[in-house]
Structure formats: C-alpha cells, structure tokens
Image (spheres, helix red, strand yellow):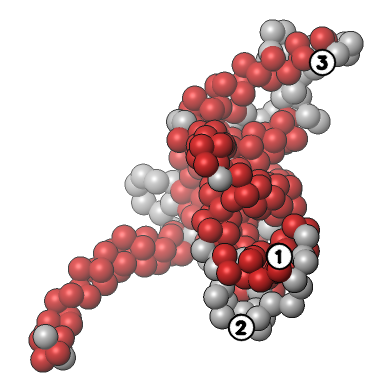
Amino acid sequence: MKKLYSNKLVILSLILPGLLLFLFAILAPICLSIYYGFTDYSGMGSFRFVGLENYRQLFQDKAFGRALLNSLLLAIGFVCIQHPLAMIVAAVLDKLGGRAENFFRCVYFIPNVISVAVIAYLWKFIYNPDFGLLNNIIKALGGAGGINWFSYDNAIWSVLLVLIWHGFGWGMLIYYTGIKNIDPVLYEAAAIDGADEKTTFLRITLPLMKPVIQVNVTMAVISALKQMETVYLLTNGGPGDSTQFAATYLYQQAFKAYKYGYGNAIGVVFILICLAATVILNSVFADRDVPRAGKGTVNV
C-alpha cells in the first residue's frame, strides 16, 4: 500500500478529478467574471473592452451602496442577535436531555427544511396590512393595526426579521454540535469546584467554542453578503432600493437590465469583500491559547 501511494501516477489520478472540478467549475468562472467586468458585454452579441469604467460607475452607484449597507445590517443582525440567541438555546437544549431535547432541536430546525418560496409567501401573509397575523395581534393588544410592513421605511426591518429567523436553526445546530463535543469531565470538575451554570458557560463552554464561533460567524457574514432568494421573493429589492442586497442587485443588473459586464464587476467586488471579511475575522479569532476540549485545565 505504501508503494502504491508513493507512485506519482497514482497520486495524480486521485487528485486529478478534484483538480479539474476546481479549475473548470470554480477558477475558470471567476477568471471569466473578472474579464467580463472590464467589458460592456450585455450577455449577447459583441462587446468592447471598457477598462475600469464599470468599477468607476459602481462606486458612484447609490443603489449598490444601499445594497452593501443592507448586507452590513444583516451581518450585524446575524452576529449580534441571531448567534448569541442560537448559542444560548443550544446550551439550554444540551441541559434538557431526553425527549424534550430532541423535540425542541427539531422544532428550531424546521424553518431550514421548508422551501424558501414557502417561507417567503408565508411571511407575506403574516405581514399583510389587511388580514395579516402580525396586524391582527397588534389589534388584539389594543393597537391600531393596518401597518404596511413593506413600506419604504419598514421594509428593510421586516426583511431582516425574516432572514434572522430563517437562519436561526443552522446557527443553533452548529453551536449545539460544538457543545456536545466538549468533554463532560470538564463540567463535572467545575461542578465539584462549586461553579454555577453561568460561570461554567462563561469559563468553559464559551472559550472552548471559539473555533466553532469563528466558523459560524464567518459563514454568517458571507451569507449576509450573498443573500438572494428570500429577499427576491419577498420584495425583489423594493420598494425602490430599500431592501436591495448585493446578490439581488447583481441579478437585476446582469439578467434583467442586460448589463452583464456591470453585473460581473459587482460579482468581483463581492468576492473581494467576502475575502476581506474572511481575513479580518480570521485575524480577530487568531488567538490559539484556548485549550481544547479534554486537554489542559480550565480555572473556574
């Protein structure tokens, strides 16, 4: 076996399929996107090279600026609202045990297995100003009701609520899995030393979850930048550009306005922002002094 795996032809035959897939499915489209970003290609017919003109227009485009701002708001919502709640819920589920743990774990994950189209139209009915569930609840509590949740001022907050709610299950499940992988001996030692649940969470669970938090937060930020389907089905970026996100704006420019070159320029900037966000988050979580589960000691 050692002789077989030391054969260069065998090694090449094993890595070639994955290498070809990467070259033709990932690297080649990225290179083509960069190239078309310097052209005025409409998606059909001939085109000409326009240099940095698309990028110059892009950084003067107020709609694109609004799309990036909305993506930033969503990323903040994911990191500051969705993920802290998801981690707390995961910790509580871990303590429940038995059938209750399995039941609530499934309940919180249900939105993630429902079609995005169903989710979007469900929330359209909930937000309906005439007969929607949300306005009916407000009326039942003595409010006026009849609020247009998709007006220019309210639409972005309504969309953010749906997106944060819809992605909650994934974040919770990842944190739940991370907590389950922590050695229970550490919790037993903390209990013997007299640590309460709050101290145990802050001094054991949270530090040992740092690699999981890093991955989850990075995925959340990238997800906020590439948000597309739910927004498209809920508002299609409207009214005006109030709920425009980077991915929806790219789609509209490339495939509806037939500005394929301009759309590819948006895609290139989008990739650069994702790479920059990943590098920044990796540097934020760069400290490697946290002990791994089951190794070292944790003072409580």
Circle on res. 138: 3
Residue depicted at x 72% and y 24%: 150
The total of numbered circles placed on residues is 3
- Spatial CA distance of label 2 from label 1 is 17 Å
Q: In this view, does 119 lie above or below 83?
A: above
The answer to whether the residues at label 1 and label 3 have Cβ atoms under 8 Å apart is no
Amino acid under label 1?
Ala
Mark 3 or mark 2, whichever is nearer to me: 2
**Reading the chain from its start, which is encountered first: label 2 or label 1?**
1
Q: Which residue is at a point 66% across and 47% down the rendered structure image?
A: 92
Horizontally, residue 152 falls left or right of residue 226, namely right
What residue did someone put label 1 on?
191
Judging depth in this view, the residue of 97 and 280 nearest the camera is 97
Name the residue nearer the viewer: 277 or 172. 172
Label 1 sits on a secondary structure element that is: helix
In this rendering, the label closer to the viewer, 1 or 3 = 1
Residue 239 visible: yes
Tell me which label, 1 or 3, sits earlier in the chain. 3
The reply to whether callout 2 and callout 1 are in contact (CB within 8 Å) is no
- Whole-Å distance between the Cαs marked 1 and 3? 45 Å
The residue labelled by disc 2 is: 296
Answer with left or right where residue 24 lies relative to residue 172: left
User: Callout 3: helix, strand or loop?
Assistant: helix
Q: Which residue of the protein is positioned furthest toward the front in this rendering?
A: 192
For badge 3, the amino acid type reads Ile
Residue 164 higher or lower than 91, as above or below: above
Query: Which of the marked residues, 3 or 2, is nearer the chain's N terminus?
Result: 3
